[in-house]
Image: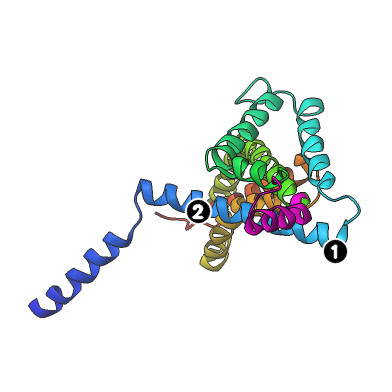
Amino acid sequence: MTARSVAVQPAGRTAAERTPGFFGRTFDLVKWLLLSLLFSVLLEWGGMTWVWPEQGSNHSRTMLETELGFLASDLRESLLVRDTAAYARRFADLSYEGLIRATGIERLLVWLGETPPTDASKVRRGAHALFAGGAEYALAAVTITQLFAVRVAILTLALPVFVLAAVLGLADGLVQRDVRRWSGGRESSFVYHHARRLIGPLFLGVWVLYLALPVSLHPGFVVLPFAAGLGLTVAVTAASFKKYL
């Protein structure tokens, strides 16, 4: 009995040590956002190469202007901010300052774009020639970074929609649970556990889909279906929760 408890305790401590804290979760969030940004850039580069080669970097620039236009025309105010377009532009500016300018990428791009002097080395001239062939891709990557930040801003503004959908779903589900409890309805743990597992993917799915979209789409067409699905899932989870605690 003592040997078993001694063997179990280290495993318990190991599991607790593996549980990420606040900084660990923040690091994971930043990591996944950067990976999503990289995927968005690669997706844009693939489209520039095979799908819309005639548009070049203008495709990403048009997407950025369109996304900001949605905020300026249809979504001017939010529960969180009064000027959604200005809020999204600040996100775009911060992403440019932090990811492009502060890291030295801006200076590198300017240096590569400058015509090398006549006495420049072969490496300098070769780097300039190589950059000249991929300048459109570099410009598109910068624009996609700003577009990515604008979409992150839009999703943060949409958080009250998900909270409202979850609250409404919870209220409706609890009512249905009470009806089932007092009318002798059947209890199904299968429905409860499977519905509960869908809550997280529905909330995260809108981030994955919207941030990776290679075309401009009105945020309402992305946010509202996922919010409705989240509310429905929360309602089913609450309604199928066990009748007696």
Q: Residues within 10 Å of mark 1 (few under 14, many from 20)?
A: few
The quarter of the image holding the N terminus is bottom left
How far across and down, in percent of the image, does residue 12 sit?
Answer: 24, 66
Colour approach in the figure? rainbow
The residue shown at (82%, 37%) is: 66
Question: Which contiguous range is marked in magenta?
Answer: 116-135
Q: Is residue 216 magenta?
A: no
Residue 236 in view of the camera: no
What residue is shown with label 1?
A: 50
Q: Report whether 205 appears left or right of 220.
A: left
Q: Label 2, secondary structure: give it.
A: helix
Residue appearing at x 57%, y 39% in the figure: 167
To which quarter of the image does residue 38 belong? bottom right
Front residue of 238/209: it is 209
Judged by its main secondary structure, the magenta piece is helix
Task: Please name the residue shown 80% across and 35% down the image.
Answer: 65
Query: Image check: 113 left or right of 31?
Result: right
Q: Is residue 122 magenta?
A: yes
Residue 4 in sight here: yes
The amino acid type, in three-letter code, at marker 1 is Trp
User: In the image, residue 161 lies at what x, y percent?
Assistant: 64, 37
Sequence order check, earlier mark of 1 and 2: 2
Residue 197 vertical position relative to residue 30 in the rendered view, above or below = below
> Closer to us: mark 1 or mark 2?
1
Quadrant of the rendered image containing residue 169 = top right
Q: Which mark is residue 31?
A: 2
